[in-house]
Every structure is written in C-alpha cells, then in structure tokens.
Amino acid sequence: MGIHYNKGNDVLDYVTDPTPLKIENGYLPVLDQPGLGVSIDEEKIIERSQEGHRWRNPIWRHEDGSIAEW
C-alpha cells in the first residue's frame, strides 16, 4: 500500500489474498466479505512475532525544527 512508515513489511504482507485491498482511485473498495473482509495469514503473523521489535514513534520535523506530525 506504500504507507511511508512501514519499513521492511507492509499491511498486505499479512493477508492471504491482497486483492480485496487494492486501492482504486485513491480509495479502498467496500469489502463484501464478513469480518475484516480479508483472510489473515496467521502463520506469517506468528513468524514475524518471533522477531520482536523496538518500535518508536518517528519524529518528522519542518526545516525550522518544529514538529511536522503527531
């Protein structure tokens, strides 16, 4: 999906079929399946959870040093 803060993986890495989440004209279509509308790849989630993480909020700043986001 190209979300700028997803480094090393993306939302679509965790679904078995990314087709329902294909962006069309800047929007996601209304999903017609029950629940989330997609099937989650639970094996992939378990695999990735073994790695752990040290997530920190990224800090984006303007040229003058003021905070640009968050």
Image (spheres, rainbow, N blue to C red):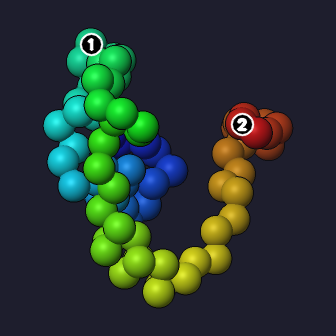
Residue 50, image x, y percentages: 47, 86
- Drawn side of residue 26 relative to residue 3, left or right: left
Residue 49, image x, y percentages: 48, 78
Amino acid type at image mark 1:
Asn
Up the image or down, 54 lies above or below 56; here it is: below
In space, the residues marked 1 and 2 are separated at their CA atoms by 25 Å
Comparing 48 with 26, the one in front is: 48
The residue lying at 32 percent from left, 71 percent from top is: 44
Q: Which residue is mark 1?
A: 25
Q: Confirm or deny contact between disc 1 and disc 2 (CB under 8 A).
A: no
Q: Secondary structure at mark 2?
A: loop
Neighbour class for label 1 at 10 Å: few (<14), some, many (≥20)? few
- Drawn side of residue 2 relative to residue 51, left or right: left
Name, please, the residue furthest toward the bottom. Answer: 50
Residue 16, image x, y percentages: 22, 55
Up the image or down, 46 lies above or below 61; here it is: below
Comparing 47 with 54, the one in front is: 47
Comparing 43 with 28, the one in front is: 43
Residue 38, image x, y percentages: 30, 42
Name, please, the residue furthest toward the top. Answer: 25
Q: Secondary structure at mark 1?
A: loop
Q: Which residue is mark 2?
A: 69
Name, please, the residue furthest toward the front. Answer: 34
Figure quadrant of residue 64: top right
The residue lying at 41 percent from left, 38 percent from top is: 36
Amino acid type at image mark 2:
Glu
- Drawn side of residue 53 relative to residue 13, left or right: right
Q: Quadrant of the C terminus?
A: top right
The residue lying at 37 percent from left, 81 percent from top is: 47
The residue lying at 24 percent from left, 18 percent from top is: 24
Q: Quadrant of the N terminus?
A: top left
